[in-house]
Amino acid sequence: EAQVTQNPRYLITVTGKKLTVTCSQNMNHEYMSWYRQDPGLGLRQIYYSMNVEVTDKGDVPEGYKVSRKEKRNFPLILESPSPNQTSLYFCASSLYPGGAQVNEQYFGPGTRLTVT
Amino acid sequence: SQKIEQNSEALNIQEGKTATLTCNYTNYSPAYLQWYRQDPGRGPVFLLLIRENEKEKRKERLKVTFDTTLKQSLFHITASQPADSATYLCALTNTGNQFYFGTGTSLTVIP
């Protein structure tokens, strides 16, 4: 089944304790992206990657890191989480999101993170 | 900075009627506009995409229009059903790298 998986689905942690949220897709997609969703603010893009070893900042990259060492995986790293990073996080992938062959994004199920 | 507004947070309509959702944007010239559906506790699911040079797109009971002069997209669901109840998001992109989403409109179809 074609899908984007995220782990963990739920996470409660404390301020300053480094954490990683994993994201994996099995569709051989070039493009992957991370979003956070907050009430009243909608989905905001954190980072995106056009291909292996190519990553770029989205709208709200502060406090986050990403890496793209393999095509299928795109982990999100919070090296020193703070309470304002409490949010619902979504990973997404797309075959090719722009140009003449625009495609839709496939989203994972989400990771609900609480930082106390 | 870009601003994307979707019409009233919640929209309630009777089953069988046409639902019309609005996506307005400022300070941006998107090349593509997408609509997604999001159910509670789940990730968004793609519905339709329209390009800046297209006026209208249809898929079954769904129709999207894109007016680059008004900086507005309208999303219509005809013959609405209770199963159409969800939150609908519009997403804009220019290059296909960075995406900007609206806050969404919650639609409830009343039987």
Image (spheres, coloured by chain):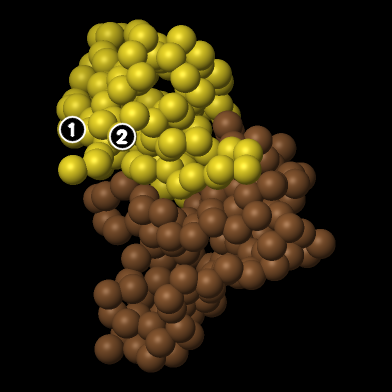
Chain colours: A yellow, B brown
Marks 1 and 2, how far apart in space? Answer: 24 Å
Report the residue at 43% width, 37% height from top: A94
Closer to the eye: label 1 or 2: 2
Q: Earlier in the sequence, mark 1 or mark 2?
A: 1
Tell me, yes or no, if residue A108 can be seen here.
Answer: yes
**In the rendered structure, which amino acid carries the disc numbered 1?**
Tyr
**In the rendered structure, which amino acid carries the disc numbered 2?**
Met
Q: Chain of mark 1?
A: A
Q: Position of residue B111 (x, y in %)?
A: 27, 89
Q: Quadrant of the N terminus of chain A?
A: top left
Q: Position of residue B57 (x, y in %)?
A: 58, 68
Which residue is more in the foreground, A96 or A116?
A: A96
Report the residue at 53% width, 38% height from top: A97
Count of marks placed on residues: 2
Location of mark 2 (residue): A27
Is the residue B58 above or below the residue A5 in the image?
below
Location of mark 1 (residue): A10
Q: Position of residue B102 (x, y in %)?
A: 54, 51
Q: Chain of mark 2?
A: A
Q: Are marks 1 and 2 on the same chain?
A: yes
Q: Quadrant of the C terminus of chain A?
A: top left
* A30 with respect to A73 (left or right): right
Is the residue A110 above or below the residue A32 in the image?
below
